[in-house]
Image (cartoon, grey):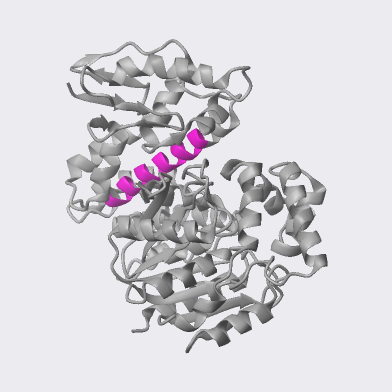
Amino acid sequence: MPVSIEVLGELRVNHGGQVRPLPSSKKTRALLAFLALAARPHRRDRLCEIFWEMPDDPRGALRWALSKIRPLVDEPGRKRLVADRERVTLETREVEIDLASLREAVEVDGMAVDELAAASRRLAEPLLAGIDLEDHEIFQRWLVAERLELQRLRAKVLSRLSCHPGLPPHEALPWTRQWLETEPFSTDAASHWVTQLAKLGQEEERDAAVRQCAERFHQAGMPWNVPDPTDPASPWPAPSPDSPLQLQQRQRIQFCTVEDGVRLAFASIGEGPPIVKAANWLSHLELDWDAPIWSPLFRELARDHHFVRYDERGNGLSDWKAADLSLDAFVTDLEAVVDASGLEKFALLGISQGAAVSIEYAARHPGRVSHLILFGGYPAGWRIGASEETTREREAVMTLTRTGWGQDNPAYRQIFSSTFMPSATAEELSWFNEFQRRTTSPDNAVRFLSAFGDIDVRHRLAEVKARTLVIHSLGDRRIPVEVGHELAASIPGAEFLALETDGHLLLGREPASQVFVEAVREFVARR
């Protein structure tokens, strides 16, 4: 029987032509909406954190809520709510969700005026009316972000109506006004409004509109050039970049299983020449898009490439319970993701310990790696030839990691402030603490640090056949730039690029991050 879920307006579930009564618990209804809109597997502990962090038995509360949702979406012989010991998924391939259907229709050009008008009216309805959970910060932040994306989607529809070639200016003008009401700081909408008023000969209204918009943008510190309606090239500025949530929604998350039974999560987004990023410390396919460290870089690479990345075993959306954390296991994971992605030849990006994994992969599969980019990499882990002082320092870091993981611990923050991100702000360090807590467990973090110490691919460097670019921060306090020099000198024909920054983790707001992206883009374009 067909199942449909309406999230615009009040939440409704229609099963087999009948509206099903929803659970009385608002939290359970919120969980159903979350599973429907974020249509991907979710870890049970993550769902407990979002909805039931305080009760004595959050997993029991989750099980109870799932038992109330199952009758709404399941039927004999067809389980749509799939749950195992680690994850919960609402299979939405056979479920029609009103917002998802509208979003898909809007993404396809060629909608008629009446279709666009109907979509605009539907998108004007509130998202999940009455489902707010003010005392649950994570869910509420997600809901607010989803509502903002709904607003942007409606603005996109209104902009198409405003600019539709089949509408004369006097019919398009009301849509333009709604567009500007929806996006009051859109210079596109303001410019088009002013242009249409001028074309309609409404000079007084046009002058008032110019004054109103100019004052608004001035107070917001935004530049705006008043359009010239006689100039066919006016008034359209460059489109604004995609938001993190839009990218998160557009990326395609899939799973594959490695020979030892560990399940890996990998994601792909964008079109163009493929770039695969080897996993490194640490990652989360969903949370990465909000990261001050990687998000701006990922956004840029996804703009004109087919960008594939994955969470390595032990963290993120991949299985946290993995017996083997070793270089061989990390390389096997990369092999599994590449094969599952169906890629034959691609550029490979390795960052930090991901550089060693990438080097080993490139040596094993010389015909598949077209370009090899290594940033902040090292061929040998900290245990290889380590002095007693270095060993004591790294062991102290592991001890602090076990006790300070994810906590607002000044001693632990100092480690990352002084070696990983010396120029990070207090807010960025606070974000990193929270990110770590949500990405893996303290025990796994210590296991990772220990495993990285045993990495050794020095014997593989001369075997790398791919065109190689080594990038390193001049002030890197974690892996000195001399290691980058030696790495480039040991790989045949490798190029070296130094970045004017002191971070082992590259902050997206730094000028060096733009240099990094431009260098990667130019390097991968070479044939």
Q: Nearer the viewer, residue 24 or 106?
A: 24
Work out which quarter of the rendered image holds the C terminus and state it: bottom left
Depth check: give the residue in front, 430 or 188.
Answer: 430
Residue situated in front as seen by the camera: 372 or 154: 372
The range drawn in magenta is 142-160
On the image, the x and y values in percent for residue 28 come to: 45, 18
Tell me what residue is drawn at x 65 percent, y 55 percent: 449
Along the horizontal axis of the image, is 420 left or right of 126? right
Eyeballing the image, is 333 above or below 125?
below
The answer to whether 12 is drawn above or below residue 382 in the figure is above
Q: Who's the residue at 66% across and 49% down the image?
A: 446
Magenta-colored stretch includes residue 13: no
Q: How many marks?
A: 0
The picture places residue 506, in percent across and down from the top left corner, at 61, 65
Does the segment drawn in magenta span residue 147?
yes
User: From the image, which quarter does the N terminus lie in?
Assistant: top left
Report the magenta stretch's main SS. helix
Which residue is located at x 47 percent, y 66 percent?
225
Left or right: 239, with 271 as reference point: right
Can the viewer see residue 127?
A: no
Give how far across and how far down residue 141 sits, in percent: 55, 36
Can see residue 485? yes
Q: Residue at x 28, y 68 (%)?
A: 344
Residue at the far bottom in the pictured view: 493
Residue 61: % across, % down: 52, 17
